[in-house]
């Protein structure tokens, strides 16, 4: 219809590069905790890019991670980044990793990628930046 304004949803790119398991002070959350809410606030327009060491968040481990022991105390409530990535995917967020960062984790990393995570070509993320209204680093 002439003069009709079509409202497009905001497109936000969230980038995480640092891999950080969490600490005793932040046992309840990690940096991915906020991503589903940002996705909702943007009208469903967030994509999450994991780069560098953070790509490991999207790869299933070969063996379970042991709980952290400090002296005589066992801490088994630290955040699980793989579970957080699964929650992000379940919220409808597109999760991207660049192929070279995935390859840096070893030849079997691509076979252990969490279902739903998309592998993009080298430098593919930079080529996509102009399509986003905002780019945030977490």
Image (tube, helix red, strand yellow):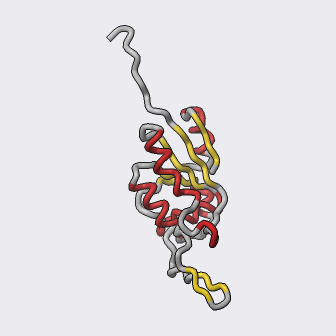
Please determine whether, in this image, residue 62 is positioned above or below residue 42: below
Q: Position of residue 43 (x, y in %)?
A: 42, 37
* Residue drawn at (53%, 71%) of the image: 108
Q: Is residue 30 left or right of residue 9?
A: right
Residue furthest to the top? 2
Nearer to me, 94 or 101: 94
* Residue beneath the point at 53% across and 66% down: 28
In the displayed structure, 98 sits above or below 112; it is above
Percent from the top left, x then y, of residue 66? 55, 83
The answer to whether residue 106 is above or below residue 126 is below
The residue shown at (66%, 85%) is 70
Which quarter of the image is occupied by the N terminus? Answer: top left
Number of numbered discs overlaid on the protein picture: 0
Residue 60 lies, in percent from the top left, at: 49, 70
Residue at the far left: name it: 1
Q: Nearer the viewer, residue 113 or 47?
A: 47
Which one is nearer the viewer's eye here, 42 or 86?
Answer: 42
Classify 114 as above or below 15.
below
Depth check, front residue: 14 or 38: 38
User: In the rendering, at what x and y percent does residue 137 appear?
Assistant: 64, 47
Q: Residue at x 62, y 59 (%)?
A: 101
Q: Residue furthest bottom?
A: 72
């Amino acid at each position: 219809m002439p003069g009709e304004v079509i409202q497009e949803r905001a497109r936000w790119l969230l980038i995480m590069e640092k891999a950080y398991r969490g600490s005793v002070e932040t046992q309840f959350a990690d940096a991915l905790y906020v991503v589903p809410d940002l996705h909702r606030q943007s009208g469903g327009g967030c994509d999450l890019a994991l780069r560098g060491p953070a790509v490991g968040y999207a790869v299933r481990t070969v063996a379970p991670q042991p709980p952290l022991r400090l002296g005589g105390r066992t801490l088994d409530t630290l955040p699980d980044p793989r579970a957080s990535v699964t929650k992000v995917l379940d919220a409808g967020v597109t999760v991207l990793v660049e192929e070279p960062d995935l390859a840096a984790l070893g030849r079997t990393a691509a076979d252990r990628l969490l279902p739903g995570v998309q592998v993009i070509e080298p430098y593919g993320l930079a080529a996509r930046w102009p399509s986003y209204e905002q780019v945030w680093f977490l």
